[in-house]
Amino acid sequence: MNMRNISDKKRIVIKLGTSTLAHSTGKLNIRRMTNLVRVISDLHNSGKEIIMVSSGAVGLGTGKLGLSKRPKDTKLKQAVAAVGQCELMHVYDDMFEKYSVTVAQILLTKTIINNPNHCENFKNTIETLVGMGVIPIVNENDSISIDELELEIGENDSLSALVASLSGADLLLILSDIDGLYSDDPHKNPDAEPISVVEEITPEIERIAGGAGSGLGTGGMSTKINAAKIASEAGIDMVIMNGKNPELLYDLFENKDIGTIFVAPKSQ
Ligand code: GLU
């Protein structure tokens, strides 16, 4: 059986990390974003139901405010996120407009996700927006949820898996600054081999995924494995691929061997 039956997937959650949408300065990667928005709009026009989870609030806020690095102080980070989220949605709204695609912002917190009524409202809003042909763009409400008490989700890999599960997605697509999962850390080991299909998240998979992310984002491969577990429990396949060449999304949806697919038990 072909594990890569991606072409059949209709409702797709696409997660974009800060390292995909911004330069290391925290300023927008205009070429990358322009290409991504074009390809995502095209997939949307082809009949895919797209829901995006986008990071970038803290990263873009850092760049816009001219700070030298991502802040650590909680209050500053909350404030920076408020500036950056505004910038982020302005950019998306503007870029998608070119293709007559309407976008909407939804900000989540852990408290919302843990509250059944609020969750229901989230699902209804997503359903209504998607039904109207709008692309919802979700982020964590960092200005409210960033704290020191573990009341935050904290990284958008897990958030995107929760969104995929709540919105009944067929596929979670994580666009990252790495081509997929490797047999070892490719930054350190030139012999590391790419892994195309993961059928089970074994302790060995967790071991090779260990380690933190880079630059302005918060996630590394281990948060992506956590996302894969959440997606897998919800019966949703997940793909990790590099976001630097958005044209590869077309190949992915032609079932070509792009990135790493984590096949959920239900769909095997
Ligand atoms: N919510 C954070 C932001 O928008 C990103 C968290 C992450 O990098 O995963 O900046």
Image: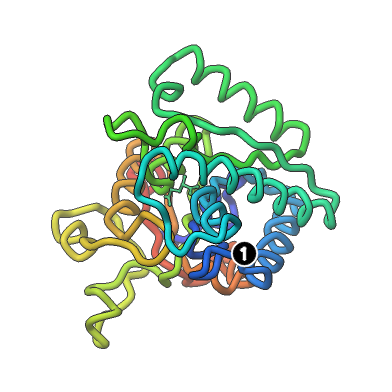
Q: Position of residue 51 (x, y in %)?
A: 61, 43
Quarter of the image for residue 209 reads bottom left
Query: Which residue reaches farthest top?
Result: 117
| Amino acid type shown at disc 1 | Leu
- Judging depth in this view, the residue of 55 and 145 nearest the camera is 145
263 relative to 137 in the view: left or right: left
Check mark 1 vs ligand 1: CB closer than 8 Å? yes or no.
Answer: no
Q: Position of residue 268 (x, y in %)?
A: 37, 49
- Residue at 72% x, 48% y is 90
241 relative to 251 in the view: left or right: left
- Judging depth in this view, the residue of 221 and 71 nearest the camera is 71
Please state, as top left, top right, bottom left or bottom right, where the N terminus lies in the image.
Answer: bottom left
Q: Which residue is mark 1?
A: 28
Quarter of the image for residue 39 reads bottom right
- Residue at 44% x, 43% y is 76
Quarter of the image for residue 251 reads bottom right
Q: Position of residue 45 (x, y in %)?
A: 78, 52
- Residue at 69% x, 35% y is 130
228 relative to 203 in the view: left or right: right
Q: How is the image coloured?
A: rainbow
- Residue at 42% x, 72% y is 179
Q: Secondary structure at mark 1?
A: loop
